[in-house]
Image: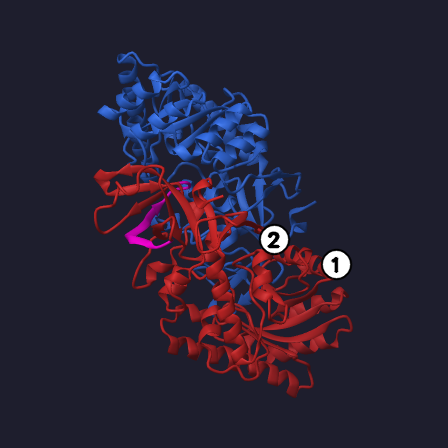
Chain colours: A blue, B red
């Protein structure tokens, strides 16, 4: 089967680019001397996970318990669930453990730590530390860290596994030096927190950091044991826009069909709209605003000069450009590929990847896990 | 099971509000003297469809061929696919016909009309007319309308079913008078186009209009045969913001759990983020910007004064407000419900509705159709 045979919109994954991105990160993290625990929240695919963990320690990171269950079904047992635990999810987490998962759960709350301790199931717990992202996490140098650690360490059923932080602020950087500086914030927070635990006689075997920009540009990860980047596998226009990758490193795209021409408005419509692309507008704040995605040749995924999806309705994408659109080259029925602003958001709408290997032949269909 | 027993995020549908919205639209459209062909692109649920078609002609509208296949599997045969057809989808459309669908396909292109004619399968076709939305459709008074109609009518395999228009610009209105004026644009375009077909000796049994705002506020639909509103079933903050419904008419919400407190930032986090709510920001341009959704009591779905999701990450929603947040009333683990800006976008992330009937008891799980 060829790309041209697919019903559109369809999610396309170029395995050649994927493998290159995965190999580059594996080498990069190995050079930093830490373990790679890839975050599967972007890919949500067992086939991608197998490539991402190859040559690494085997553990992964997930953003939902459904992902954890899905990857466990596919044979991956060492799973960090990197969103704050709540008491209402402890039974579900314990059930994964009963089914063979070595699940690590996360908390930054003394109340939740007490609930985990009281739950009685053999939970393995990481303490979330804030390194400047101001989302989740306790201060690396504050009193709560040790309070939580003691509650967990004192519970016979619980294993205190260590500390975890995420420098989400790395997405606000625009160059390598800035990302390296944030990577050092991330490292320093995690290592400080782990050091305080150990100084207090508490264990911290895991010292976990990670985002794609910081993993890519960190200069030194002394004291860290693992990093958890995710979007590096696919890349996207936002990552390219902040300098983490090139546009040629974007492995995922949406195959779409031209469904209408409006030459009077210098607009054409494709059948990839708000659901197929997502309403992510993260490139709006970057020097080049890519609208809802850049329009590329279907065969090569090379951008067609200046064409972008400028507006979306549920199933319609309105393609605009700075110059007159090439209506003759893109008749109704012609296919294009749209590079996404944000791979995590766009991929989430699909139940599978149509996999190519650099060309246009569809060599596989890789299912995805969606929802919660 | 009670709402409090659900793992979050979860999509909640209040059947009592749904039924009230559906009954009101059915009565409204009956009073206008036309048929109601509900658009199922929002609900994508056979259970909702059964309620929406009850007491009506039985036909529905869909936005994807997957929806068409799904509803056909659930016994609905009269289906209008209201997105422009392309040659590459004709085989799939014909296969639905072979399986018993009375599928109506749509075009505004002479080239596509010729492809439909040449395809040979017994396609039933509506011609898309533009009534001012400037998305799809030929001009009601232009030459292409008759060109397309003749190509279709001359093809032995094809049945020219009539004309269809959609006043998407009704979403830009802010009051009933403006929506009534757009409804008249919508009616006039469709009736003009149908009249021109008939004057040319061509059939137009169907004269189809519709959007929720125009169906709600149309004053006269003389000459129209059917209307196709969709979001009226669920309503959302955008529809409430433009005056189509009240906030108490919003039938769908996202159940979420508080997963973190940041009193220093007057922020708390819930486990409904960009995927669970969508990145739709349509209320941004309305007098009251609801962020990524309004935060409500889990039990009653009543808004908690001024609380909204102000920022999202993939699985984190950051709740903010104009006054100090009620952290004590919303401890970590507490549940809330988030009303969506745009029901179509939010619901699309879920594989099922958890159905309540005005209270908190979950009385059913209604699956949804997702993807393409």
Q: Secondary structure at mark 1?
A: loop
In the image, A155: left or right of B190? left
Residue that label 1 marks? B99
Measured along the vertical axis of the image, is residue A369 above or below residue A30?
below
Q: CA distance from mark 1 to mark 2?
A: 21 Å
Work out whether B86 lies above or below A71.
below
Q: Residue placed at 49% from the left, 51% from the top?
A: A277
Q: Chain of mark 1?
A: B
Q: Nearer the viewer, residue A231 or A333?
A: A231
- Residue shown at the point (21%, 50%) measured from the top left: B323
The structure residue drawn at horizontal position 50% and vertical position 58%, both measured from the top left corner, is A314
Judged from this view, the residue extending furthest toward the bottom is B199
Packing grade of label 2 (10 A; few <14, some 14-19, many >=20) is: many
In this picture, residue B309 sits left or right of residue B78: left
Numbered disc 2: secondary structure: loop
The residue tagged 2 is A8
Mark number, residue A291: none
Residue B207 as seen in the image, left or right of residue A189: right
The majority secondary structure of the magenta stretch comes to: strand
In the image, residue B252 lies at what x, y percent?
Answer: 45, 55
Task: Determine if residue B33 is in view.
Answer: yes
Packing grade of label 1 (10 A; few <14, some 14-19, many >=20) is few
Query: Horizontal placement of A7 versus A33: left or right?
Result: right
Do marks 1 and 2 both belong to one polypeptide chain?
no
Q: Nearer the viewer, mark 1 or mark 2?
A: 1
- Percent x, y of residue A150: 30, 18
In the image shown, does A310 or A366 lie closer to the viewer?
A: A366
The reply to whether the C-beta atoms of the residues labelled 1 and 2 are less than 8 Å apart is: no
Range of residues picked out in magenta: B301-315
Relative to A224, say whether B183 is above or below. below
Residue B309 is one of the magenta-drawn residues:
yes
């Amino acid at each position: 089967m060829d790309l041209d045979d697919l019903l559109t919109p369809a999610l396309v994954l170029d395995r050649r680019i994927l493998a290159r991105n995965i190999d580059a990160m594996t080498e990069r993290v190995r050079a930093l001397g830490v373990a790679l625990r890839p975050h599967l929240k972007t890919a949500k695919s067992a086939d991608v996970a197998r490539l991402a963990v190859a040559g690494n320690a085997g553990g992964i990171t997930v953003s939902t318990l459904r992902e954890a269950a899905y990857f466990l079904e596919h044979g991956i047992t060492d799973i960090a669930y990197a969103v704050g635990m709540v008491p209402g999810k402890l039974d579900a987490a314990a059930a994964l453990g009963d089914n063979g998962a070595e699940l690590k759960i996360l908390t930054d709350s003394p109340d939740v730590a007490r609930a985990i301790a009281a739950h009685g199931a053999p939970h393995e717990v990481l303490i979330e530390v804030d390194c400047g992202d101001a989302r989740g996490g306790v201060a690396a140098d504050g009193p709560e860290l040790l309070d939580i650690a003691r509650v967990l360490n004192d519970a016979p059923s619980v294993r205190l596994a260590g500390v975890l932080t995420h420098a989400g602020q790395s997405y606000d950087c625009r160059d390598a030096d800035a990302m390296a500086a944030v990577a050092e914030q991330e490292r320093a927070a995690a290592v400080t927190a782990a050091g305080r635990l150990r100084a207090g006689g508490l264990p911290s075997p895991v010292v976990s950091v990670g985002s794609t920009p910081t993993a890519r540009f960190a200069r030194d990860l002394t004291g860290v044991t693992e990093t958890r980047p995710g979007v590096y596998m696919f890349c996207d226009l936002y990552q390219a826009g902040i300098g983490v990758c090139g546009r040629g490193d974007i492995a995922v795209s949406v195959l779409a069909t031209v469904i209408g021409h409006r030459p009077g408005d210098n607009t054409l419509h494709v059948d990839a709209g708000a659901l197929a692309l997502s309403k992510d507008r993260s490139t709006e704040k970057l020097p080049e605003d890519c609208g809802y995605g850049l329009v590329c040749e279907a065969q090569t995924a090379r951008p067609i000069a200046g064409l972008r999806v400028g507006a979306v309705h549920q199933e319609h994408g309105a393609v605009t450009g700075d110059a007159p659109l090439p209506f003759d080259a893109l008749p109704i029925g012609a296919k294009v590929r749209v590079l996404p602003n944000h791979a995590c958001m766009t991929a989430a709408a699909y139940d599978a990847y149509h996999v190519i290997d650099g060309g246009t032949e569809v060599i596989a269909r890789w299912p995805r896990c969606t929802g919660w």
